[in-house]
Amino acid sequence: MRVIVTGATGFIGRNLIKALNKEGLNVTALLRPESRGAVQNTRKITAGLLDKKELEKKIKDADAVIHLAAKLEGTKGELQQVNVQGTENLLEAAEKNNTKKFIYLSGTMVLGSSKKQLDELSKCEPTGDYAETKLEAENLVLGFKGSIKTTVLRSSMVYGPEEKANRLKIFCMIKNKKFAIFGNGKNHLGLIYVDDLCRAIIHSLKKDLPGLYIVSGGNYTMNGFINIIADELQVKRPMHIPLAIAWPAAIAMGFLGKITGKKMPLFPTRLKNLTSNQELDTTKMQKTGFKPRTSLSQGIRKTAQWYNQEGLL
């Protein structure tokens, strides 16, 4: 089976490429022409997601496309162009080349916060431009009319080796005693270790799983997540900041950020995300035969070990 992967130079992509190679699949990384990320032991092709003709040329002979690439920051228009239009272009190119499967990786941030358990039928209330454009792309993929079989995997927050952005910042802030939990920390979030997510993607690739599936390694409280990291790093568990103090600070910093054009450490959307509640129901995915293998404590330990080995902590 020949599989084309977008976003191959990213955190999830690098781990997925390794996992696909271990499975003995014929893997090709589709990179942006300007990409400088390294992908080892894998065939590479280049094409921009907004270049329809080039995509049609490069997607030839692919049995499946796994679409991980996304733009995380920018204006709403820029995000729509890459995350929505780019996804549509890639999907149409795959359809024209008679590709059999198209797997799109989304995230549970499209669901928003809820006091109720969330599943594939729950109403989506995305917060922020990125989540809104990911939901638009989801709907586009699921509603696509053609012969290609489409799957959307809606993943919870992913952590593990190779992640050098938000999760690494959390680890560093906790180690340096600069992290605080906003509110009581009893809000829930879904977490999945990157190896388990890669297994879920490969599981979807091998099986006939059209439609939408929520993928997560389990539901944890913010306290549980942060305290396990602190315990693994052998530092004092972070303090709590009451929301009555956090919200005015977030609003003020958000306003200051707009005036100065500088990125603030806290703003309303970020605070809302950090205090949102998501308890995920993964029954639908479990019924297909997929189950995560890595507990949170095991995953945090492996992640901390990798960060230490790389000199990042």
Image: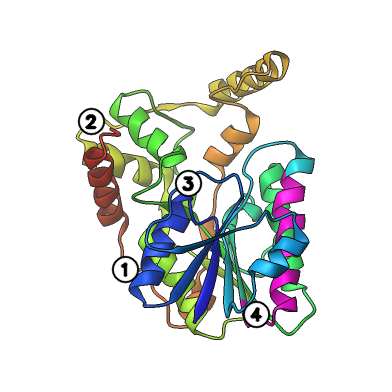
> Residue furthest toward the left?
234
Is residue 55 or residue 291 the one in the foreground?
A: 55
Q: Is residue 75 magenta?
A: no
Tell whether label 2 touches label 1 (CB within 8 Å). Answer: no
Q: Is residue 35 above or below residue 154?
A: above
How is the structure coloured here? rainbow
Could you give the CA–CA distance between mark 1 and mark 3, rounded to whole angstroms?
29 Å
Residue 43: percent from left, percent from top: 47, 65
Residue at point 79% right, 42% down? Answer: 77
Residue at point 68% right, 18% down? Answer: 261
**Left or right side of 272 for 222:** left
Q: Which residue is mark 4?
A: 99
Residue at point 75% right, 77% down? Answer: 96
Could you give the CA–CA distance between mark 4 and mark 2, rounded to whole angstroms?
50 Å
Could you give the CA–CA distance between mark 4 and mark 3, rounded to whole angstroms?
26 Å
Q: Is residue 2 above or below residue 138?
A: below
Is residue 129 or residue 178 the one in the foreground?
A: 129
Q: Which mark is residue 235?
A: 2
Indicate the secondary structure of the residue bearing disc 1: loop
Pair 4/2: label in front = 4
Q: Which residue is mark 1?
A: 293
Q: Quadrant of residue 40?
A: bottom left
Q: Residues within 10 Å of mark 4 (few under 14, many from 20)?
A: many
Indicate the secondary structure of the residue bearing disc 2: loop
Tell whether label 3 touches label 4 (CB within 8 Å). Answer: no
- Sequence-first tag of 2 and 3: 3
Amino acid type shown at disc 3: Gly
Residue interval drawn in magenta:
79-101
Q: Which residue is mark 3?
A: 37
Indicate the secondary structure of the residue bearing disc 3: loop
Amino acid type shown at disc 1: Arg
